[in-house]
Image (spheres, rainbow, N blue to C red):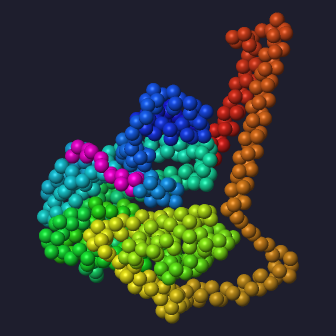
């Protein structure tokens, strides 16, 4: 049930939505549709007025609601399988603009984490923040050995703020699933849970430090990407200390040109770094927007902010590479087969129908030159088409698509004629040969030998037990299904709701009968406000049963 504090917060959210002209969004919900006439009675809606596009108003409302909702909008923008194109594109423009908190409080946070004064830890600590975001703030400092570092500090009380706002988002999501016609299909509760997990992952700065160390190790022998060193003795769950880097922001194209950096080579190198991470390292930076990338005077990429990283399992890697190759060969049947084989769409999907749908969406794309084709948009169109066939979007693929769009936009900002296909093709073909060729076969055998040597001696006994159970008729086959499990839960929920309604209604009806009989008996005692106490008791119990059955139903949803 909604708590009083949530009611106040919800009222504030509705006020912000109305202020941005989104009152029609509120009144269009199934729950409030009977009150839609209020929209037409409001004086400010009587005269025509110019309004910004719906998507722009939604973005500005989220910015006014605060950093947690900005973060939610940013994450939601990656779920373009859920949103109309105009809203998804606009939400991607959300900026994490948050006023910094006082440097003295940051200093206090650091001292609390280490249990000693800042002067004992650092030779110098600048209280003026270098950067500020919704989760943390960054300050420059110097270690006692003279090394320049940056110190990332979590915002004070950020866990409590996140818990409060996420709790409200969960309540709204449950209401959406109940009263919104698309709520069941789009599963807003799962979206909020995914958002909560991402937020709490970012709150653990030791996790981010581990991500940075892994990425640095992956590129330790490469001159394409430099990852700052993590100073582990100084890292805590709420404080992270890493090497300070000095580079040119990648969005500052004029400065890059002044330093004589080849923009064509730089844009191609960015794409190579991305595909190296995805198809060779299987560990990629999933937040590669311009604010997190710098370039050294020598043309080497430098990355920061490792809170969100993505991985793909070998099966997803293979199917993704095959999908791209089949797409650019216009082999739409193979694209459809791959989606079914990988179980990205239900196994019962008709391949010929899916192939036709993919062809309809993708064929117009090939009217453009290859250098103008967007890999990210290819993935997006495939996701949108597959949604009609009940495709369940995989979080790792969503992160990949978002990062790919960032890399493409960045590459074409540096060099508009970037031919992404020519850069990506060698990686895709190499990945396919490594996963399907002779080398892949030998590697898999080598990896499997220890397991085989362990299980081979047990095979005769297992075969004997199997044959013995078969002969004795004791062999059992167990089968489970997520859909059957969901159906059972829905049936149990419906039964509980029905029982609660019957019991509650019966008690209320009993209260009414007692009240009616008391009216016939003028000698009745023990009354409250003219009604017998038994009538009040039965009515109260009936109402409580009805409310509890509905509340439990909402919690199960």
Q: Position of residue 231 (x, y in %)?
A: 26, 65
Q: Residue visible at 41% across and 46% down?
A: 53
Residue at 36% across, 54% down = 93
Q: Residue at x 58, y 53 (%)?
A: 187
Residue bounds of the magenta highlight:
90-103
| 68 is higher (above) or lower (below) than 141 | above
Vertically, is 426 above or below 410? below
> Magenta stretch: dominant SS?
loop
Provide residue 46's location: percent of width, then percent of height.
46, 29
Specify whether 496 is left or right of 468.
left
Residue shown at the point (56%, 66%) measured from the top left:
385
**Where is residue 39 shown, x and y percent of the image?**
51, 32
Residue 222 at what x, y percent from top left?
28, 80
The part of the image, by quadrant, that contains residue 539 is top right
In which quadrant of the rendered view does residue 469 lie?
Answer: bottom right
Q: Nearer the viewer, residue 335 or 227?
A: 335
Residue 101 in sight in this render: yes
Residue furthest right in the image: 472
Could you say which is closer to the camera, residue 366 or residue 207? 366
* Residue 154 visible in the shown view: no
- Looking at the image, which residue sits at the far top? 523
């Amino acid at each position: 049930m909604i708590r009083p504090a949530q009611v106040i917060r919800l009222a504030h959210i509705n006020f912000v939505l109305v202020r941005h002209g989104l009152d029609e969004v509120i009144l269009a919900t199934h729950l409030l549709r009977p009150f839609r006439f209020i929209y037409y009675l409001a004086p400010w809606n009587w005269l025509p007025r110019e309004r910004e596009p719906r998507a722009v108003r939604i973005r500005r409302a989220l910015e006014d609601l605060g950093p947690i909702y900005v973060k939610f909008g940013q994450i939601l923008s990656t779920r373009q399988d859920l949103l109309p194109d105009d809203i998804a594109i606009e939400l991607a423009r959300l900026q994490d603009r948050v006023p910094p908190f006082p440097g003295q409080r940051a200093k206090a946070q650091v001292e609390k984490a280490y249990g000693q004064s800042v002067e004992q830890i650092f030779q110098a600590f600048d209280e003026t923040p270098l950067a500020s975001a919704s989760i943390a703030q960054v300050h420059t400092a110097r270690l006692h050995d003279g090394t320049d570092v940056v110190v990332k500090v979590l915002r004070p009380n950020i866990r409590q703020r996140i818990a409060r706002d996420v709790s409200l988002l969960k309540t709204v999501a449950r209401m959406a699933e109940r009263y919104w016609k698309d709520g069941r299909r789009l599963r807003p509760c799962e979206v909020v849970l995914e958002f909560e997990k991402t937020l709490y992952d970012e709150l653990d700065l030791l996790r981010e430090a581990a991500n940075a160390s892994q990425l640095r190790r992956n590129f330790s022998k490469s001159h394409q990407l430099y990852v700052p060193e993590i100073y582990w003795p100084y890292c805590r769950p709420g404080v992270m200390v890493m090497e300070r880097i000095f580079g040119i922001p990648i969005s500052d194209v004029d400065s890059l040109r002044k330093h004589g950096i080849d923009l064509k080579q730089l844009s191609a190198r960015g794409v190579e770094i991305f595909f190296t991470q995805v198809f060779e390292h299987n560990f990629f930076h999933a937040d590669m927007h311009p604010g997190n990338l710098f370039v050294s005077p020598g043309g080497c990429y430098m990355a920061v902010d490792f809170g969100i990283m993505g991985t793909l399992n070998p099966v997803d890697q293979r199917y993704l590479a095959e999908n791209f190759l089949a797409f650019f060969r216009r082999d739409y049947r193979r694209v459809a087969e791959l989606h079914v084989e990988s179980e990205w769409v239900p196994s019962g999907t008709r391949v010929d129908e899916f192939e036709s749908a993919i062809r309809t969406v993708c064929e117009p794309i090939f009217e453009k030159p290859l250098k103008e084709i967007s890999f990210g948009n290819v993935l997006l169109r495939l996701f949108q088409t597959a949604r009609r066939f009940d495709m369940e979007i995989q979080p790792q693929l969503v992160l990949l698509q978002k990062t790919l769009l960032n890399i493409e936009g960045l590459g074409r900002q540096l060099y508009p004629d970037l031919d992404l296909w020519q850069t990506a093709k060698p990686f895709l073909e190499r990945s396919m040969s490594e996963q399907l060729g002779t080398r892949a076969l030998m590697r898999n055998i080598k990896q499997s030998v220890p397991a085989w040597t362990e299980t081979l001696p047990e095979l005769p006994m297992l075969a004997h037990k199997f044959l013995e159970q078969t002969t004795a008729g004791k062999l059992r086959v167990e089968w489970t299904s997520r859909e059957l499990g969901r159906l059972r839960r829905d049936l149990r929920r419906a039964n509980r709701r029905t029982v609660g309604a019957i019991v509650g209604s019966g008690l209320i009806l009993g209260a009414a009968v007692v009240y009616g009989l008391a009216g016939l008996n003028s000698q009745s005692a023990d009354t409250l406000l003219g009604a017998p106490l038994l009538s009040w008791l039965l009515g109260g119990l009936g109402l409580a049963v009805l409310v509890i059955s509905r509340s439990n139903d909402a919690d199960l949803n």
